[in-house]
Image (spheres, helix red, strand yellow):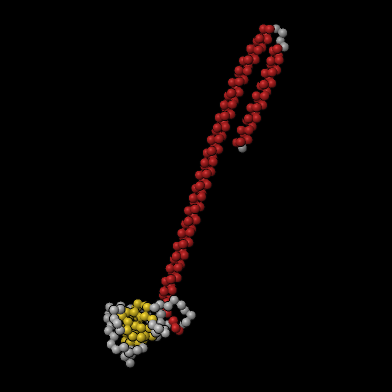
Amino acid sequence: MKKHSITYLASVLTLVVSAATQAQQNEMQRCAAMEDSLERLVCYDNMAKNQQRQHGEDMQQRQQMGQQQQEMGKQQREMGQKRGKKQGQEGRQHGQHMAEQAREKGQAMRSERNHREDDDRQDNAERFGMEHKNADQQGKIEKLQVKVAERREDPYGNWIITLENGQVWKQTESVGYFRWQEDGDYYIERGALNSFFFGREGANRRFRVTRVE
């Protein structure tokens, strides 16, 4: 729209200059046709004054047109800067939004993986000693640290051990005297052929057990 306005003003100015030139030629012909030399001189003098006035008006119009072009150019630059600033801001906001979505997705995936790993560890601990009864289950634990909630001997002198997690294990071999400690660190360790051994950290003696519950 502004470009068309500039073109229109230039066309108008060209028409005005052309019309003024044609008027000057007509005036010169009119003065030259005068027979009285004084009248002819006055006519030329008036024509010169008119030319000076017209030249001043043309200069003023050119100056106004130049100022208008400068103002329009300034407005166009400002609009371009505003558009660039707006586009840059929108681009940064879009990038920040995408980065935030990526962070949230990554956190959700890590949280889900951690929950899955916790569930797997809990399931493995609960299945410890029973995997041979369900051969399709994977993720076997080789050694499980346990806390003894209760222990007692059966009529044959074998220990029946109840753990704090609710599991019940029974001694299946005689190894002689086993020294218990109230604050001892106990474990159940996997052996060969689905066998398990109950022992205490720091002690050499351990005995074979099987899980009954």
Residue found at the very far bottom of the displayed protein: 155
Query: Is 29 rendered above or below residue 160?
Result: above
Tally of marks:
0
Which quadrant of the structure image shows residue 205? bottom left
In the image, 42 versus 201, the foreground residue is 201
How far across and down, in percent of the image, does residue 51 sit? 63, 18
Which quadrant of the structure image shows residue 211? bottom left
How far across and down, in percent of the image, does residue 172 sit? 36, 88
- Looking at the image, which residue is at 62% across and 15% down? 49
How far across and down, in percent of the image, does residue 41 sit? 66, 9
Query: Is 208 rendered above or below residue 12?
Result: below
Query: Is 162 rendered above or below residue 101?
Result: below
Left or right: where 170 falls relative to 78: left
- Looking at the image, which residue is at 32% across and 82% down? 199
Left or right: where 134 falls relative to 170: right
Which quadrant of the structure image shows residue 160? bottom left
Left or right: where 60 falls relative to 196: right
